[in-house]
Structures are given as C-alpha cells and as structure tokens.
C-alpha cells in the first residue's frame, strides 16, 4: 500500500511538472505566430539605436514571418525603454534595442526600477564601433591636438554627447581626469538632437558612434578629429586614434545589443538569436552596418550576456572615480 501511494505521488508530481512545462513549450513552438513583435528602441528617432532597429526590422520580419514594429521609447539614457521591456510579458513579443549606456546605467542612475542583470537577458550583441570626436566644418579645431591645447587652458573645451552617463561622456571624463584636461559636458537626448546642434555649430565638439557621425563627415558638414578605439576605423582611415595621439592605451568602443525580459522562454531567445545572426549575414545588412562603422559581433546569448556584464563592471569604476551623475 505504501509503495502504491509513493508511486501515485510520483506520478502526480511528474504530471504537475509536465503541465507547467507544456505552456512554455507550446509557446516557444507557436512563436511568433500570435501577434506582431515589438522592438523597443530605447533612444529617440534619428540616433544609432533607432537606425539599427529600423535596419534589422524588415529583414527579421521576413525571416520570422511576423510583423516587427519598431517603437521609440527614449529618456534617461535608455533606461526608460529598458524598464518598459523589463516589465513587459516574457512571451517573446517584446524586445529592447539598447546602446552602450545600458552598461553604465546600473552604476549611474540611483533606484533604477529594474535590475539590469536579473530582469533582462541578452539575446545578442549586434556589434561594436569606435566613437568619433568631431567638430563642425567652420570650427577653430582643425586637429585633435587643437582640442588638447584648448582643454589644457582654464576655459577648457565643451563637448556634447547623447546624454549624461553615455559612453561618450564617460570616455571624455576618463580622458580629462587622467590627463589634466578640462572638458565641459553638454548632454543631449540622443544622437539625432546632438548631430543637429553639432552640424549647426551650436556645440563646439560632439562625440558619437561612427554610425551617427560619419554621414555628416561624408557630407563635409563636420570634421572628424579622433576615434576612441585602439585601432583606426576602416571607414575613417585618415582619422587618428586618441591612443596614438599621446594617450597610449585609451580605448572606449560603442556597442549595440538586443535584450528580452528575463523570463522569456530560452527556446524563443535562441530562435530570435538565430534569426538576428542570419539577418546580419545578409549582404545588404552587413554592407550597411559596415558602412556605418559597426563591427558585427553576433554569437550566442551567453556570450552577449558575458560581454555586457563586463561592460557594467568596467564603467561602474569610471562613474565612481569621476563622481558622474545622471541628468
């Protein structure tokens, strides 16, 4: 009798486990047939996050057989959009397209309404890119050396970035603090507004990704002075690195990634990862990403998560050492 009760109890436990697992398995199998997929770009229109999202969306739509709708939800260095995705149902129909600020926000913004490490999971790292320090065509800054000369004086030099605590802001803060340079930061709400003012000469210097800066360099409305990676950008081969301009070892790449709510079924995350990897190998997509300065990374969700967590650790120290505060 005892053996029978034990066997019955075991069967009940197995049945319960199976019934719990079944909806997840069914969801993953049916995905994405239920409804359109929302891709939340966590910065306003015009910037690199928006452009990357809109480049990927139609190809993902074709690959997955479901509409992919890009929705801009900017503010607070991308954390407002990220928070919305963290709070969204983990059903595979909401994803976030984030920028490198996502790796900074946990140490920069007090009382974030979500845990960056626990409430969001990485689907894929799209790629990395040098950031470019640039100036408008009529600027007095002809070379990066001119910027350094100005920054050594009491008045210093002013620069704009896509927002307080953005990687561009942190890179310039790191450069200034470690080398006795006086930079004044002017935060903007995304790459679009920054470039509008930079092209018009309303801000003396601007730092942004190759993706967002290069079109204005190509049109001769802006002049690139230096890039933030240890190697020159293939798309701007004549532009020196900060490292080779007297600041050895300096490196600060921009990056983009796609995230999902943390409890999204692993099977769905894996399928989305596979679809994006495939889309980025499309010759047209690859060419357009390369033309805008993005070095495609791709790979697995696990590799992407490890990369982002390393970025969080690196920039947390810079935020603390430079006492950087959000807008």
Image (cartoon, rainbow, N blue to C red):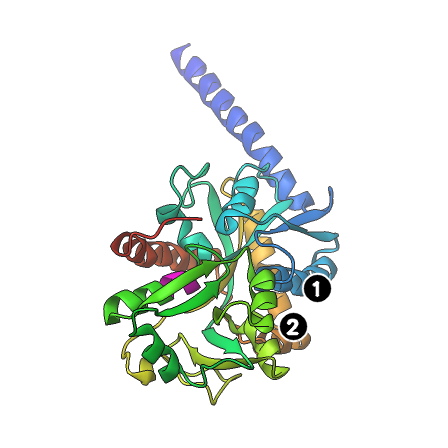
Depth check: give the residue in front, 265 or 118: 118
For the record, the magenta segment spans: 167-171
**Is disc 2 surrounded by few (<14), some (14 to 19) or many (20+) residues within 10 Å?**
some
Tell me whether the residue at label 1 lies in contact with that at label 2, contact meaning CB atoms closer than 8 angstroms.
yes
For residue 264, say whether it is visible: no
Q: Is residue 22 above or below residue 102?
A: above
State which quadrant residue 214 falls in: bottom right
Q: Tell me if residue 168 is in the magenta stretch.
A: yes
Local packing at callout 1 (Cα closer than 10 Å; few below 14, some 14-19, many 20+) is some
Residue 199 visible somewhere in the drawing: yes
Q: Is residue 74 above or below residue 184?
A: above
Q: Is 246 or 41 nearer to us in this picture?
A: 246
Residue hosting label 1:
59
Residue 285: give its label: 2
Q: Residue at x 71, y 52 (%)?
A: 69
Circle 2: element type? helix
Q: Position of residue 327 (x, y in %)?
A: 44, 48
Foreground residue among 190 and 84? 190
Residue 130 among those drawn in magenta: no
> For the view shown, which residue lies furthest in the top direction?
1
Q: Does 263 appear above or below 50?
A: above
């Amino acid at each position: 009798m005892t053996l029978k009760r034990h066997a019955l109890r075991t069967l009940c436990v197995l049945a319960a486990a199976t019934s719990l697992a079944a909806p997840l398995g069914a969801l993953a199998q049916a995905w994405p047939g239920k409804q359109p997929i929302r891709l939340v770009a966590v910065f306003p229109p015009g910037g690199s996050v928006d452009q990357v999202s809109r480049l990927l969306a139609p190809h993902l739509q074709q690959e997955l057989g479901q509409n992919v709708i890009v929705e801009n939800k900017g503010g607070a260095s991308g954390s407002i959009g990220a928070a919305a995705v963290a709070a969204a149902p983990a059903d595979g129909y909401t994803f976030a397209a984030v920028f490198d600020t996502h790796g900074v926000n946990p140490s920069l913004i007090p009382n974030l309404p979500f845990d960056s490490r626990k409430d969001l999971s990485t689907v894929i790292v799209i790629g990395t890119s040098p950031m470019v320090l640039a100036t408008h065509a009529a600027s007095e800054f002809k070379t990066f050396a001119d910027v350094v000369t100005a920054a050594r004086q009491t008045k210093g030099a002013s620069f704009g970035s896509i927002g307080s605590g953005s990687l561009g802001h942190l890179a310039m803060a790191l450069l200034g603090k470690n080398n006795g340079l006086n930079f004044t930061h002017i935060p903007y709400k995304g790459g679009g507004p920054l470039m509008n003012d930079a092209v018009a000469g309303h801000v003396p210097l601007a730092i942004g990704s190759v993706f967002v800066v290069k079109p204005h360099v190509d049109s001769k409305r802006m002049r690139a002075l230096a890039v933030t990676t240890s190697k020159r950008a293939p798309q701007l081969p004549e532009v020196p690195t900060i490292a080779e301009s007297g600041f050895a070892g300096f490196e600060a790449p921009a990056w983009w990634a796609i995230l999902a709510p943390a409890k999204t079924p692993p099977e769905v995350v894996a399928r989305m990862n596979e679809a994006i990897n495939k889309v980025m190998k499309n010759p047209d997509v690859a060419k357009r990403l390369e033309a805008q300065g993005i070095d495609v990374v791709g790979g697995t969700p696990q590799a992407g998560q490890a990369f982002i967590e390393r970025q969080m650790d690196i920039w947390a120290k810079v935020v603390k050492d430079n006492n950087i505060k959000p807008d």
